[in-house]
Amino acid sequence: MKREEVLVTKEELNIQNEYAKKVKEYYDTQGKTPKALVETFGCQQNENDSERICGMLETMGFGFTENEDEADFILYNTCAVREGAEMRVLGNIGALKKIKEKRPELIVGICGCMMQQESMSKRIKSKFKHVSVVFGTHSLYSFPEIMYKAVCENERVISRIESEGRLCEDIPVKRKPGPSAWVSIMYGCNNFCSYCIVPYVRGRERSRDPEAVIAEIESLAKEGVKEITLLGQNVNSYGKDLERDIDFADLLLMADKVEGIQRIRFVTSHPKDMTDKLIATLPKVTKLCRQIHLPFQAGSNRILKEMNRGYTKERYLELAEKIRAVMPDASFTTDIIVGFPGETYEDFLETVDVIEKVRFDSVFSFIYSKRGGTPAAKMENQVPEEIKHKHFDILLDVQNRISREINETYSDRIEEIMVEGISKNNPDAMCGRTDSGKIVNFPKDDTLSVGDFIKVKITKISTWSLAGERV
Ligand code: 5AD
Ligand code: SF4
């Protein structure tokens, strides 16, 4: 697609704004502020999409609630990466049938990656009659039109699946208040790793114009945001689809100049696109956090090839070393898949070997999940469930030991953290995060506000978090 076809035009956006106004007028004439409950499954990209959905709902006159019984509209923004997540969503959606029977005026919707798959959309259409709003990731920008039909014309809207993803600037975003924000810099993925559904449901890579990205970061800084996370399925290929000469390293340097922002993070990187230029740029980005997330997925070269990852174990280890050479104190995290078709115990040991050699701070490990439509789903030598689970447990044991050992090196250290709020597990404690991404709990202090930067001395460590005292 040409760039001008990728971008949603001002005219198209105006049409959507008109639909949003009509929905608002509809509720206004009823003297009602409708309430929406938006539940998000999956990755940060989905969270960011939900923030845009909520932004659009706000322009349609909606308020928000966490309570299903209070909601006029319940929307599930779904993830398709693993089967387990899909099953959970279907279970939850099924459970909404009872509420819909009691309150027929309730509108139930499903959107996101699951709904970008024809088979799933059809399944909802025929089996979940209480769901009346269905749209995939590519239709996000036309959400006001979908809602107009559902609310004002009382229609069941099963949106046509648009085959190409586009880019839409100027959609309002409603973020949770706080010092941290996600900023999508690109959408989609061109990599077609053989196990992964993402390229099929998120479409081809589309980079936002750098001016739009920087303008968004500037406006976030004005609102008081201190930490941004640049988002994309593969941020390292940012700019490849733009007609000018700009890459992710350039964008990082531009973001670094935005006043008021104090921390920059980014996810996710693909090892095959981590260029020497990018690695050399990392230490020049003054606000960049000492944290690198670099998925390696598997340690066996044979499996990496079958996965279509485009690098070898040796290349990955070399990359990790190069990054450590320029950012010696960076924390390292990764994604790993256990039980890809054909993975033997010997192959799995190669994965463990990478874990031992790189010594990740933490890993996001996943049991391979067969995704219809991907090449790996058709591979014959699928690994039995019990073997996958056995290997998974071994991996967790190895990683938990390493995570704890690394955390122990934080003992007695003085670290700067950004205060994030009350600790999740203890109402008498607050928590914050080091720039290496470690959660630190510390005694509640009423003089502190969310977003403050303070120094703490680490007094206690565990596998998952640290505890400290303000100094
Ligand atoms: N099964 C298991 N894990 C998967 N991931 C992607 N597809 C699958 C799948 N079919 C994991 C990868 C990716 C992370 C976001 O999800 O590790 O990096
Ligand atoms: Fe999926 Fe691979 Fe793209 Fe990541 S890089 S989203 S694993 S296809």
Image: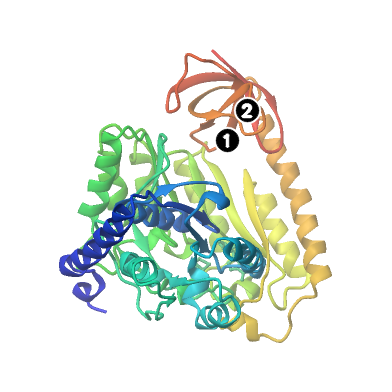
The amino acid pointed to by label 2 is: Tyr
Q: For ligand 1, which image quadrant applies?
A: bottom right
Front one among 295 and 34 = 34
**Image quarter (top left, top right, bottom left or bottom right) of the C terminus:** top right
Picture residue at 26% right of the left edge, 65% below the top:
19
Q: Nearer the viewer, mark 1 or mark 2?
A: 1
Q: CA distance from mark 1 to mark 2?
A: 10 Å
Percent coordinates x, y for residue 276 in the rendering: 39, 55
Residue drawn at the location 51% of the way across and 38% of the way down: 328
Quadrant showing the N terminus:
bottom left
For label 1, being within 8 Å of ligand 1 is answered no
Q: Quadrant of residue 342?
A: bottom right
Labelled pair 1, 2 in contact (Cβ < 8 Å):
yes
- In the displayed image of the protein, which residue is found farthest to the left? 11
- Can you tell which mark lies on residue 438? 1
Residue 410, disc: 2
Viewer can see residue 172: no
Of mark 1 and mark 2, the one earlier in the sequence is: 2
Residue 86 position within the rendered picture, expressed as x and y whole percent measured from the top left: 62, 68
Tell me the kind of residue under disc 1: Lys
* Image point (38%, 74%), residue name: 204
- Identify which residue is drawn at 29% across, 44% down: 217
